[in-house]
Image (spheres, rainbow, N blue to C red):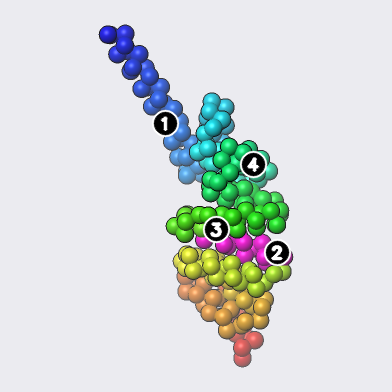
Amino acid sequence: MRKLIVLCAIFFVSVGAVVAQKADALDLYRKGRYSEAIAVCEQEIRENPANIDSYCVLCWSLIRNRQYGQAEQYALEARKKNSTDIRLIEALAEARYYQGKNNSALEMFQLYVTNAPASASDFSWAYYYMGEIYMRQARYEHADISYTMAVHVDPSRALFWTRCGYAREMTNTYTAALEAYNKAIELDASQADALRGKERVSARLR
């Protein structure tokens, strides 16, 4: 009986250690210690290749560490195990965005916003990135639509409003552009791009 109790105690301590290790990876990521989070996640995946949570934290950490190619490869590897996980879809989209793979990134962001709940933490950012891709492609009306969705989901970000204003400026809708720039400045008076944009469109409207 004593031996059984000891074995049980060892088992629960071991399980607790594994859980703690998993929690540590996410905690390291949240603290900005991306290289350490990467190392922990890679170890977790070696121990359990089916651990999708570890893949997700690994991809996020690699992206924040600007290791975009590796993030893309791990996201692709993880999607072979679970192709519908929205965290992997967003991570793959973002990794491709930063590598300039515009069309494939856009495809993934579109898949993400189609499947993710509006309450998802990256939902507004997905629309922002879509807007940035359309801007790269000089598809300004599409960019305006994407940025407008971004500010609709999260109206508290001056950056979103600034980029929305610029897209509208590029489509010559100056009154709407001025409204977006004013909103950006209201949220953050130091938004230099919004201030310059306001000057430009105000001159156009005079």
In the image, which is nearer the foreground, mark 3 or mark 4?
A: 3
Mark 4 and mark 1 lie on one chain; the one further toward the N terminus is 1
In the image, which is nearer the foreground, mark 4 or mark 1?
A: 4
Mark 3 and mark 4 lie on one chain; the one further toward the N terminus is 4
Q: What element carries label 1?
A: helix
The residue carrying mark 2 is 136
Q: In which quarter of the image is residue 78?
A: top right
Determine which of the numbered discs, if any, sits on residue 76 in the image.
4
Answer yes or no: is residue 154 visible. Answer: yes
Q: Name the residue located 57 percent from the left edge and 68 percent from the top edge.
A: 147
The image shows residue 3 at horizontal and vertical percentages of 31, 8
Q: What stretch is highlighted in magenta?
A: 124-137
Q: Are dots 3 and 4 in contact, CB under 8 Å?
A: no
Q: Name the residue located 29 percent from the left edge and 13 percent from the top edge.
A: 5
Q: Is residue 59 above or below residue 190?
A: above
Answer yes or no: is residue 192 visible. Answer: no
Q: Name the residue located 67 percent from the left edge and 65 percent from the top edge.
A: 134
Q: Are dots 2 and 3 in contact, CB under 8 Å?
A: no
The residue carrying mark 3 is 114
The image shows residue 59 at horizontal and vertical percentages of 58, 42
Q: Residues within 10 Å of mark 4 (few under 14, many from 20)?
A: some
The image shows residue 111 at horizontal and vertical percentages of 59, 55
Q: What kind of residue is marked 3?
A: Thr
Cα distance, mark 4 to mark 1? 27 Å
Provide the major secondary structure of the magenta segment. helix
